[in-house]
Structures are given as structure tokens and as C-alpha cells.
Image (tube, rainbow, N blue to C red):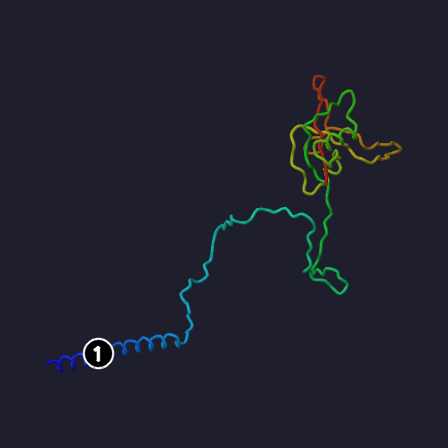
């Protein structure tokens, strides 16, 4: 009986060792297979096609305008051998043109005398820095023409003096004009105070 028990224990031990060794060998083979696997490329082909957008596109997350202090250097402009910027095509330079800037809120009386041109110049420059009184001649020549204004305004007829049949027409004389460029009396009647704003021009 003792021999049978000893023999059974030996057989059971041999089977247990065989089972543990087989499982360990299988794990080693799985790890070896995983580490030697060759990577294969991945291709994604289901992206949607480019879509056309109609209507208005609003991009609202742009950064605010930033103030730049100091000097800004631009060094990637195309230059010729002399270091000058090369420009292709026709280059049209348009100089600053005088235009109507505004009408003063201040009003200037026509009595006892019409206001002097320099007085009107100062009035324009006070409300619109860098401007002066307009002349009828330059307002008529403006392209595009100025917008219409209500009532009448002070302008000077011309800045230069003219000689017509030995008569000197001095420049700088102020007069009243409607928005169609026609001169009118600055005081329509005795009860009319004859006060008008000035039409100011600048560049």
C-alpha cells in the first residue's frame, strides 16, 4: 500500500512540473512573437471631400490690433543689384488732394464787415486741425464733389488776386455760398443776422 502511494506522488509531481513548464514556454513564445511583429502602415481614406461655402464667412477670433513700439524692419523684399525694390507693372502715384473736411459749428457774422480769410482759417483749424477755409474755385473742381450742405456757408472767392480790365480783384474775400456753389447775399434782409458757418478744407 505504501508503495502505491509513493508511486502516485511521483507521478503527480512529474505531471505538475510538466504543466508549469508548458505554460511558461507558451508565454515566452507569445512575448517573442509580440516583440518581433513587423509594423504595418495605417491608411485613412474616409475623409470628407472639400466642401464649397456660399454666403458670408465670419471669422471672429482674430487677435486684436497690437501696438508696435520701436522700429519695424522688413528685410525680405525683392531687390535688384543696386539694393532698390523691384516693382513689376505700372506704378501710379496719386498725391493728396484737397477736399472738404467739415463745416464749423462756430458762426461768423457778415456785419459790419465780412470776416477776413485769416479769421475763417483760424476758425477751421480750431475745429478741424490742419484745415483752412475753402475757396469756391477749389470746391467746384473737387473730384469727387463734396456732399450737399444746408443753408449757406462762408468760403473765399479765390486766394489769388486777378486783374480784369485794369481792375484788381483781390483774393481772399469771403462770401456766402449754397451747396450748389452759387453765391448769395450773406444778409438776405435787415432782420437777418447774417451769421454763417465756414466750410473747411484740408488734405
Q: Quadrant of the N terminus?
A: bottom left
Q: Tell me what residue is drawn at x 54 percent, y 49 percent.
A: 62
Q: Quadrant of residue 146?
A: top right
Q: Nearer the viewer, residue 87 or 157?
A: 87
In the displayed structure, 59 sits above or below 109; it is below
Q: Tell me what residue is drawn at x 52 percent, y 49 percent.
A: 61
- Residue that lies at the very extreme toward the top in this rendered image: 191
**Horizontal side of residue 57 vs 23, given as left or right:** right
In percent of width and height, residue 100 lies at 69, 37
- How many labels, in total? 1
In percent of width and height, residue 200 lies at 71, 34
Q: Quadrant of residue 84?
A: bottom right
Is the residue marked by circle 1 packed among few (<14), some (14-19), or many (20+) residues within 10 Å?
A: few
- Residue that lies at the very extreme toward the left in this rendered image: 1
Q: Nearer the viewer, residue 49 or 12?
A: 12
Q: Nearer the viewer, residue 15 or 157?
A: 15
Q: Nearer the viewer, residue 66 or 92?
A: 66
In percent of width and height, residue 35 lies at 39, 75
In percent of width and height, residue 113 lies at 79, 22
Q: Tell me what residue is drawn at x 45 percent, y 59 percent.
A: 51
- Of helix, strand and loop, which one carries label 1? helix
- Residue that lies at the very extreme toward the front in this rendered image: 2
**Horizontal side of residue 41 vs 62, given as left or right:** left
Q: Tell me what residue is drawn at x 65 percent, y 32 percent.
A: 149
In the picture of the structure, the residue carrying the numbered disc 1 is: 13
Q: Quadrant of the C terminus?
A: top right
In the displayed structure, 2 sits above or below 132; it is below
Q: Quadrant of residue 155?
A: top right
Amino acid at each position: 500500500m505504501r508503495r502505491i502511494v509513493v508511486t502516485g506522488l511521483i507521478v503527480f509531481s512529474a505531471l505538475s512540473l510538466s504543466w508549469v513548464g508548458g505554460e511558461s514556454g507558451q508565454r515566452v513564445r507569445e512575448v517573442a512573437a509580440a516583440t518581433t511583429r513587423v509594423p504595418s502602415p495605417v491608411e485613412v481614406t474616409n475623409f470628407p471631400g472639400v466642401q464649397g461655402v456660399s454666403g458670408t464667412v465670419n471669422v471672429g477670433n482674430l487677435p486684436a490690433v497690437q501696438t508696435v513700439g520701436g522700429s519695424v524692419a522688413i528685410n525680405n523684399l525683392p531687390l535688384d543689384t543696386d539694393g532698390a525694390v523691384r516693382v513689376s507693372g505700372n506704378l501710379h502715384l496719386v498725391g493728396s488732394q484737397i477736399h472738404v473736411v467739415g463745416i464749423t459749428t462756430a458762426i461768423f457774422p457778415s456785419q459790419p464787415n465780412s470776416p477776413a480769410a485769416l479769421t475763417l482759417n483760424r476758425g477751421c483749424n480750431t475745429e478741424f486741425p490742419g484745415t483752412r477755409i475753402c475757396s469756391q474755385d477749389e470746391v467746384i473742381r473737387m473730384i469727387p464733389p463734396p456732399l450737399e450742405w444746408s443753408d449757406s456757408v462762408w468760403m473765399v472767392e479765390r486766394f489769388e488776386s486777378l486783374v480784369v480790365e485794369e481792375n484788381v480783384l483781390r483774393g481772399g474775400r469771403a462770401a456766402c455760398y449754397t451747396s450748389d456753389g452759387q453765391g448769395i447775399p450773406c444778409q438776405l434782409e435787415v432782420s437777418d443776422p447774417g451769421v454763417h458757418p465756414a466750410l473747411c478744407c484740408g488734405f
